[in-house]
């Protein structure tokens, strides 16, 4: 397989911070808001350099979403930032009415998404946010996979006109996406071409998918690895082209299987091209405290789980 | 044409719109008519072209802006916007009907001039108005932002998040109104969930608090002018606005029963008999 060497491990949220720093210097319309989690969102540099363009909201996420919508009315590009759980489930009605239905140019940029928030436990580990956000008309949903891609996604979100939910994580993971790889909202990226099975992964699971690819290759199985950084709009063209070639697929995400990326892919397949699909994701359960790695193992989100799912999908192929 | 005459037509529109589709919220709409007429026809500085015709831009740069947080009283807003020239009054006949721009609760999705945010799910308008006021400051625009909320709506927690935020960030280009009619769907507000002394609450949060009779044009003029004079002094302003639900139609007054009830044919005729036609019915 194509190699994705890495020399560094960083958190995706730092990629967001780096993107915001750049936007602070290049786009005078960008403003940020935060609900008492500035350190966690890595926006210190943006705030230092642009104090007049930052609004501390305190622990009041609902108000933050409304204030963001108001700022967007005046032509600003607000980034409302907090933990993913508090930027989605806690404020779903505010996001629905003031941002999505009103079609305001608000970017809801949230960290600590998914299971790998770790020790804080299930109250903070949102595993349902992609389902909520993709269900909203007008909403674009992005879940980048590493530091470099999160930085690129942040910059692309500011340039895009319309509501965006931009989701990233807490743990440090390998930085493997080349810094200069183009990022286009809604355009999937093929990381490895293969013929036996398509693996569609998003967020932290993209790295696991690459590891799975290597493991499968050692067993003589050729896997196509596609990075679905945009959950909505979904790149159905890339998905169908790949599955038409390989004949089966696996979806992999750090999210509930219910309502996640996998279900969007299943919908694409059932309405266009029938093929076996296996799901790697959290299976209708809340998380718990633990290290990110322990949780990934316990809830079946590791490369080995993707390998197993890939073999199952291949075995179910009829031709 | 004086403001009272315009208000009479707006009230005719309200009862006719709600009657026409057998749904909607006449009580609060009638109560807030005088406030909205005063704002849109006298006190707000609106963007107009060389012929005095209002011009609508979504960003509202260089003009005063109004937000309706208690979106269920959409009939009064729609009628006032139409007569102020944002869209043809004839369109009021489409209220709440299929394919209309006049949704039951205001929405931007239908691109109705004058509407900049959706409202209906309560408690969100104050936050939006605050954000817009901050945006105006960033844009170097010295115009004001107005927002109207219901008194029942004050029960929403988000109101108090916003009430804390605005003084902290010195949002002093904002004038908020609480429509204090004392009624909500399930009955008198003090019985459903007592707000107690709203003015004292806002004052404790750091707001400048004024009181006004929202159905009296002398009070409206005096207090709106006073409120505008108090902007730019580091504090947001809230005007507790006493209104009578159903104002102008005797059998709709002094009760919560017309909060969300449409008049039948006889009731419509009775209501219209109390309201002189001034601008021509749609």
Image (tube, rainbow, N blue to C red):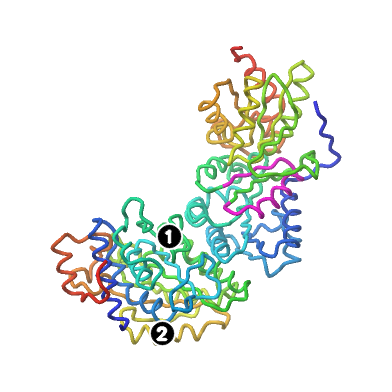
In depth, the one of B246 and B208 nearer the eye is B246
From this view, report whether residue A158 is shown above or below residue B54. Answer: above
Circle 1 SS class: loop
Task: Find residue B25 and report its horizontal and vertical position in percent.
Answer: 29, 62
For disc 1, the neighbor class at 10 Å (few under 14, some 14 to 19, many from 20) is many
Residue tagged 2: B223
What range is drawn magenta here?
Answer: A140-163
Q: Is residue A266 left or right of residue B22?
A: right
In the rendered structure, find residue B119 and report the number of the disc placed on it: 1
Sequence-earlier tag: 2 or 1: 1
To which quarter of the image does residue B260 belong?
bottom left
Quadrant position of the C terminus of chain B in the picture: bottom left
Please indicate whether residue A12 sits to the left or right of residue B169 in the image: right
Chain containing the residue with disc 1: B
Chain to which mark 2 belongs: B
Q: Is residue A158 magenta?
A: yes
Q: Quadrant of the N terminus of chain B?
A: bottom left
Q: Residue at x 31, y 79 (%)?
A: B215
Instruction: Tell me residue A264's x, y (percent).
Output: 55, 34
């Amino acid at each position: 397989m194509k190699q994705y060497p890495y020399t560094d491990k960083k958190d995706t949220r730092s990629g967001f911070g780096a993107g915001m720093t750049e936007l602070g210097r290049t786009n005078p319309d960008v403003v940020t808001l935060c609900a008492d989690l500035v350190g966690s969102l890595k926006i210190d540099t943006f705030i230092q350099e642009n104090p007049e363009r930052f609004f501390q909201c305190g622990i009041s996420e609902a108000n933050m979403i409304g204030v963001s919508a108001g700022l967007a009315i005046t032509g600003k590009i607000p980034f409302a930032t907090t933990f993913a759980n508090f930027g989605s489930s806690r404020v779903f009605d505010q996001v629905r009415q003031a941002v999505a239905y009103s079609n305001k140019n608000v970017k809801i940029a949230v960290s600590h998404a998914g299971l790998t928030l770790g020790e804080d436990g299930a109250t903070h580990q949102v595993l349902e946010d992609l389902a909520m956000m993709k269900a909203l008309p007008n909403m674009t949903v992005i879940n980048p996979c590493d530091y470099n891609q999160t930085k690129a996604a942040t910059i692309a979100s500011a340039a895009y006109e319309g509501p965006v939910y931009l989701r990233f994580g807490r743990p440090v993971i390998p930085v493997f996406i080349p810094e200069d790889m183009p990022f286009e909202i809604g355009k999937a990226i093929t990381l490895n071409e293969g013929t036996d099975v398509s693996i569609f992964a998003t967020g932290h699971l993209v790295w696991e998918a690459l590891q799975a690819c290597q493991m499968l290759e050692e067993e003589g199985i050729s896997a196509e690895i596609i990075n679905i950084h945009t959950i909505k709009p979904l790149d159905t063209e890339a998905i169908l082209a790949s599955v038409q070639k390989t004949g089966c697929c696996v979806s992999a995400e750090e999210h509930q299987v219910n309502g996640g990326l996998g279900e969007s892919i299943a919908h694409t397949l059932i309405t266009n091209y029938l093929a076996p699909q296996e799901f790697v994701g959290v299976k209708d359960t809340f998380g718990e405290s633990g290290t990110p790695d322990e949780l990934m193992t316990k809830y079946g989100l590791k490369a080995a789980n993707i390998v197993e799912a890939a073999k199952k999908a291949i075995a179910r192929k009829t031709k | 044409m004086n403001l009272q005459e315009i208000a009479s037509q707006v009230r005719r529109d309200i009862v006719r719109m709600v009657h026409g589709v057998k749904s909607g919220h006449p009580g609060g709409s009638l109560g807030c008519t005088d406030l909205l007429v005063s704002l849109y026809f006298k006190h707000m500085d609106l963007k107009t072209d060389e012929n005095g015709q209002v011009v609508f831009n979504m960003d509202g740069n260089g003009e005063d802006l109004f937000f309706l947080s208690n979106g269920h009283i959409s009939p009064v807003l729609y009628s006032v916007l139409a007569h102020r020239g944002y869209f043809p009054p004839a369109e009021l006949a489409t209220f709440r009907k299929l394919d209309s721009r006049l949704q039951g609760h205001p929405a931007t999705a239908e691109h109705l001039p004058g509407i900049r945010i959706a409202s209906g799910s309560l408690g969100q308008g104050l936050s939006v108005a605050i954000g817009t006021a901050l945006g105006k400051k960033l844009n170097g625009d010295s115009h004001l932002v107005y927002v109207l909320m219901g008194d029942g709506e004050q029960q929403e927690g988000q109101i108090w998040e916003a009430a804390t935020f605005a003084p902290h960030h010195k949002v002093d280009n904002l004038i908020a109104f609480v429509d204090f009619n004392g009624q909500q769907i399930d009955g008198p507000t003090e019985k459903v969930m007592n707000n107690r002394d709203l003015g004292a609450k806002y004052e404790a949060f750091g707001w400048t608090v004024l009181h006004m009779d929202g159905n009296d044009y002398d009070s409206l003029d005096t207090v709106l002018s006073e409120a505008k004079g108090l902007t730019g002094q580091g504090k947001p302003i809230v005007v507790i606005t006493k209104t009578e639900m159903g104002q102008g139609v005797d059998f709709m007054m002094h009760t919560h029963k017309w909060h969300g009830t449409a008049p039948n044919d006889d009731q419509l005729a009775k209501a219209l008999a109390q309201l002189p036609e001034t601008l021509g019915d749609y």
